[in-house]
Amino acid sequence: MDPLEPMGRENETSVTEFILLGLSSNPVEQLVLFGVFTAIYLVALMGNLLILLLVCLDSRLHMPMYFFLGNLSVVDIGYTSSTVPKMLANYLSGDKSISWAGCLSQMFLFISFGGIECLLLGVMAYDRYVAICHPLHYGAFMSRQVCTLLATAAWVMGLTNSAVHSSLMSTLSFCQGNVLRHFFCDIPPLFQLSCSDTRANQAVTFSLGGAVILGSFLGTLVSYVYIVMAILRIHTKEGRLKAFSTCASHLTVVSLYFGTIIFTYIRPNSTYSQEQDRALPVFYGIITPMLNPIIYSLRNKDIKAALWKMIGSRLYS
C-alpha cells in the first residue's frame, strides 16, 4: 500500500497506526538528517548528563539555581528522547509506521516534558528575580523546601496538562488517513487527520496549554522587567555587568524556546500546515535541549569551575 494513501474511507476503517514521513522523503536527505540528528542527540544527552552529574557531585552547586538547572537537564534528556530515537530508527530502517498506542505515548511524553520545561524556565526566572532584587532575603524566599515545592509543582502541572490532552486525543476517531507529515505525533497534525469534532480539544489546547505556556512566559517576562529595573539602578558599570551576567544565559534560553512553542500551539488549527510547520518543533524540542548545557556551561563560572575540578581530580587520581 502506498503510504501516502489513506488507510480507509471515512466511517469504514479505523486507523490503528500512523506513518511518520519525517522531515524529508528523499533517501539522500534522510541519510544526512540521520547523521545530523544523531550528533545533536548525543551532544544533548552527554551535555545534560554532565550538568546533572556536576550538580549532584559538587557541593558548591548545591544552590537553588543549580537545583533547578539539574531538573531542567532531566527534562531535556526526556524531551529529546521522546522523539529523536524513533525518528532515527525510522530513517535507518525505512519503516516509518508507529502504532496508535505508541503515537499517543509519544505525544504524552513530548507534551509533558515541554510543559515542565516552560514552567521550570519561569521558576528559574523567579529565582534570578529574588537573587537580584531581594538578595538579603534570598535564603528565606528560596529555601530548600520552597525550591522542592516549586520543582514538584512544575512536574505535577506539566504531567497533568499532558494527561488531559492525551485523554481527550484518545477519544477522537481517525478514519480518513494515517499519514503525518511530521517526525513525531503532535497535537496539531493529529487534529487535522481526525474525522471527529475537535473543537472541544482545540478549546482545551488554547485554554489549558495556553495557560501553561503563556503563564510561564508572562511570569518570566515580569521577572525580567523587575530584574532590568534593578540592574539599571546599580551605579557602577561593573556592578551592572556582573548582575546581568547571572541571568544572561537563562534569558538566552528563554528567547530561543518560547518564540517557537507559542507560534506552534497558541494559534487556530486552521492556520497550521504540516508541510510548512513540521520543522518548528526541531527548535524547541531538539535544538534548545542541546543548547541548554552548552549555554549554561560556557557562560557560568561555577559550572566551569566544577567541571575543571572533576577533570583535575580524575587526572590526579
Image: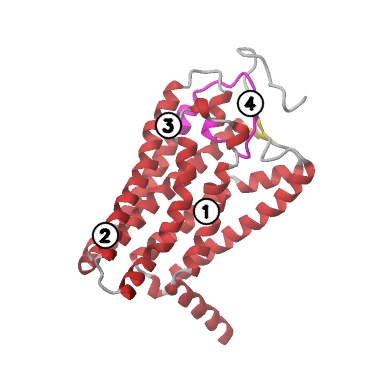
| Residue at mark 2 | 229
| Residue at mark 3 | 205
Q: Nearer the viewer, residue 12 or 194?
A: 194
| Residue at mark 1 | 288
Q: On screen, 144 above or below 182?
A: below
Magenta region, residue range: 165-188
Q: Earlier in the sequence, mark 3 or mark 2?
A: 3
Q: Nearer the viewer, mark 3 or mark 2?
A: 2
Label 1 vs label 2: CA separation?
A: 28 Å
Residue 301, picture quadrant:
bottom left
Identity, as a three-letter code, of the amino acid under mark 4: Thr
Identity, as a three-letter code, of the amino acid under mark 2: Met
Mark 1 and mark 3 in contact? Answer it, CB < 8 Å.
no
Name the residue located 77 percent from the left edge and 26 percent from the top edge: 2
Q: Earlier in the sequence, mark 1 or mark 2?
A: 2
Mark 4 and mark 2 in contact? Answer it, CB < 8 Å.
no
Name the residue located 54 percent from the left edge and 35 percent from the top edge: 186
Position of residue 197 measured from the top left corner of the image (x, y, whole percent):
48, 18
Q: Nearer the viewer, residue 70 or 235?
A: 235
Q: Earlier in the sequence, mark 4 or mark 3?
A: 4
Identity, as a three-letter code, of the amino acid under mark 1: Thr
Label 1 vs label 3: CA separation?
A: 22 Å
The total number of labels drawn is 4
Position of residue 81 measured from the top left corner of the image (x, y, whole percent):
57, 50
Q: In the drawing, does residue 268 fall left or right of residue 13?
A: left
Q: Residue furthest top?
A: 11
Is disc 2 placed on a helix, strand or loop? helix
